[in-house]
Amino acid sequence: MNTQEGPAEQARAVGRRNRPWLLGLGAVVLVAVTVLVTTLAIRGLPNGIVSHGDVPTLTAVQRSALDNAVAAIGKVNAAVEVGVNFPTYGQLLIDAKAATNHVVEVGATPAITNILQETIQNYVDAAKAWQSKVQYPNLKLASVYGDAALLQKYGLIPSNGKKDDGVDPDTAMQKIWGVAGSHYRQLLAAQSGV
């Protein structure tokens, strides 16, 4: 103790040295708050709201709709990966589109709905290329046949470089499905972040 301190200061200094339990109490409070916050993050907040820090929140209804839509798009993605016939692809696409529409209807965040709609649109575009192949098996996708927007959107260029020669529908579908798969992976990342 400093001899220049008065009796009140000396008593406070002794009291501070003799209160190690106060530090232990602070640690207990910190652990309790951490457990509470973690529990709320895992189980969700009251009224069906799920929170993840600064990430926008989804209600339980929105979360369920999003999970269903991602699962439906996942089925389309898996079908493309293993091989699927056109009628089955069409049915999977209808189911995925309906689930996507439901996410939009329940008002999920714009960031989620945008990537969701972009992903489903990629699969729809691939179906358009496939439909063209089915209807016109001897023709390529070309601007003269009304395919300009599709060709431009995916940067599809004829293998010989001549714009009017068109693009093989199989090549177009593979390229579009590649873009769709990339968007699907982004969708999965976005889904896990909300």
Image (cartoon, rainbow, N blue to C red):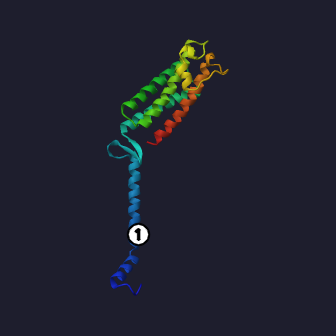
Q: Front-most of 181 and 18?
A: 181
**Which residue sits at x=57%, y=12%?**
136
* 25 w.r.t. 138: above or below: below
Q: Where's the C terminus, which quadrant?
A: top left
Secondary structure beneath dot 1 equals helix
Q: Front-most of 23 and 166?
A: 166
The residue carrying mark 1 is 23
Q: Position of residue 56 (x, y in %)?
A: 40, 42
Q: Position of residue 63 (x, y in %)?
A: 40, 38
Amino acid type, residue under disc 1 in the picture = Leu
* 3 w.r.t. 165: above or below: below
Can you tell which quarter of the image residue 17 is in?
bottom left
Q: Crowdedness of circle 1 by 10 Å Cα count: few (<14), some, many (20+)? A: few
Q: Where's the N terminus, which quadrant?
A: bottom left
Total labels drawn:
1
Q: Is residue 84 visible?
A: no
Q: What residue occupies the far right of the structure in this picture?
A: 160
Q: Is residue 54 visible?
A: yes
Q: Front-most of 163 and 113?
A: 163
Can you tell which quarter of the image residue 30 is in?
bottom left
**Which residue sits at x=55%, y=16%?**
132
Q: What residue occupies the far bottom of the structure in this picture?
A: 3
**Which residue sits at x=51%, y=37%?**
186
Q: Position of residue 49 (x, y in %)?
A: 35, 43
Residue 37 appears left or right of 159: left
Q: Position of residue 93 (x, y in %)?
A: 48, 24
Can you tell which quarter of the image residue 163 is in?
top right
**Which residue sits at x=59%, y=24%?**
156
